[in-house]
Amino acid sequence: MMVAMRARIVLVLLAISALAAQPARRDVSLVVVGGTVITENAQHRALTPGAVAIDGSTIVDVDTPDAIAARYRAADTLDARPDIVLPGLINTHTHAPMVMLRGLADDLALMDWLQRYIFPAEAKTVSPEFVRTGTRLAALEMIESGTTTYTDMYYFEEVIAEATRRAGLRGVLGETIIASSPDAKSADEGLARTESFIKAFKNDALIVPAVAPHSIYTLDRTALLASKALATRYGVPVLIHLAETDAEVQGARTQHNATPTGYLEAIGFWGPRTVAAHGVWVTDEDIAILKRRNVGVSYNPESNMKLASGAAPVTKYLAAGIALGLGTDGAASNNDLDMFEAMRQGAFLEKLSTRDPKAMPAQAALDLATIGGARVLGMERMIGSLEAGKRADLITVSMGASRQTPLYNAVSQLVYTTRGDDVRTTIVNGKVLMANRTVRTLDRAAVIADAKKLAEKVREAVRTR
């Protein structure tokens, strides 16, 4: 009996010792469990099933559900199985409030669309109220379709920033500088507004202020260089439209004896953290300049097709090692902000224009919408992939729709089949903005009602212009 008792005591002591040897589980704020987790890291690691541990605004670990459960004790768990979990999508070029001009002037070439319809309509309608209402509608659309970071060029950008922050989205937001605009009567006044905007939001957790000179055809050399100087002084990005149409290139050759890219190189415009939107009509020499100057390029396939602007040389950009991301452009020329549609159309357009079905494979398209977009914005250490130490910006996507069946390859399904309304959950900076298709940071009914009310004013202004 004594021997048996001693044996039991030894077993108890061994069990206590084993428990003591196990590391204590770390407390975290949230664990997201998915049927598949696509990390978009350098190895394109995917886990089926997988889980992401989040503490506050930061991802602390990505592993199998069992491994995460063994290491972490979560205050809250989101079981998204069998959904796909992936990084939030990054829109590298848009004009958010222009959702209020959606469908106003369709089936037109760019310059006709801008000069005869959009610029006159904006002159009559754009105000802080217009911008606030439009941004809230755009934010609702982006949250519902899985965009977690967007890049904007528009007017009254401080209003856009406030609405973006309240919605919980991350934004790289540029006050547009143009010869005359709804919020500035001159480029100089636009620069002054931009400086005030930068000072107000320079250290914001969600907002990155930027300088946004519109283009070489709306600004002179002095204004372009003043824009660069302002961005350099405050260490913020520069956003600009570049070589969107053949007419723009021909105009630059006539006026400056150079391509748009070459002209900006000649005047010393290019600097660090510059994002060039479109880049459709570029030469091999232009591409070499953009690479040498570390310029990021935003590929906007849908608006380029709709306005018949052309097809950007995506394969050449990628071969040159240029940071390339996807953009929707504004909803007035797209006509939506759905980045899944941008992926799908972007891949199809590149295959068609190169006549190569292997051009822009699904993985490359997903890269452009996530980590590629982060590189364009100079934010790849913060966002764009699900990795420990990065911000907790992620989405879950349902594979339950009939069109999602069967599922053989998760990445191909995301790019070629998925739509924005397949997104179930959107998380930015560790905060759940939408869960099970219910947006928490915006009153959906109120946002849509306000937009419909404002649309009546826009309709009347355009009718009487």
Image (cartoon, rainbow, N blue to C red):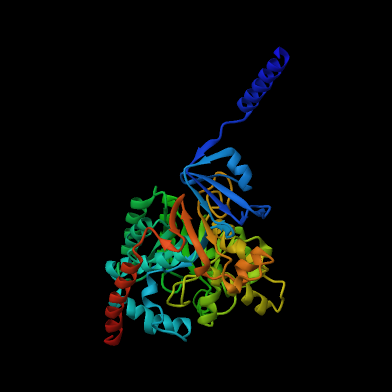
Residue located at (59% from left, 73% from top): 402
Residue located at (45% from left, 58% from top): 435
**Residue 18 appears anywhere in the view:** yes
Residue located at (62% from left, 27% from top): 19
> What is the quadrant of the N terminus in the image?
top right
Relative height, residue 326 to residue 345 (above, below): above
Relative height, residue 389 to residue 88 (above, below): above
Q: Position of residue 192 (x, y in %)?
A: 32, 59
Q: Is residue 209 left or right of residue 340?
A: left
Closest to the observer, 386 or 292: 386
Q: Position of residue 386 (x, y in %)?
A: 58, 51
Q: Position of residue 41 (x, y in %)?
A: 63, 52
Answer with the quarter of the image where residue 142 lies.
Answer: bottom left
Closest to the observer, 371 or 49: 49
Answer with the quarter of the image where residue 389 lies.
Answer: top right
Q: Is residue 277 left or right of residue 158?
A: right
Q: Is residue 328 left or right of residue 67?
A: left
Q: Which residue occupies the extreme top position in the image? A: 2
Count up the numbered dots.
0
Closest to the observer, 448 or 244: 448
Q: Which residue occupies the extreme front position in the image? A: 1
Q: Position of residue 5 (x, y in %)?
A: 68, 16
Q: Is residue 432 left or right of residue 380?
A: left
**Residue 282 appears anywhere in the view:** no
> What is the quadrant of the C terminus in the image?
bottom left
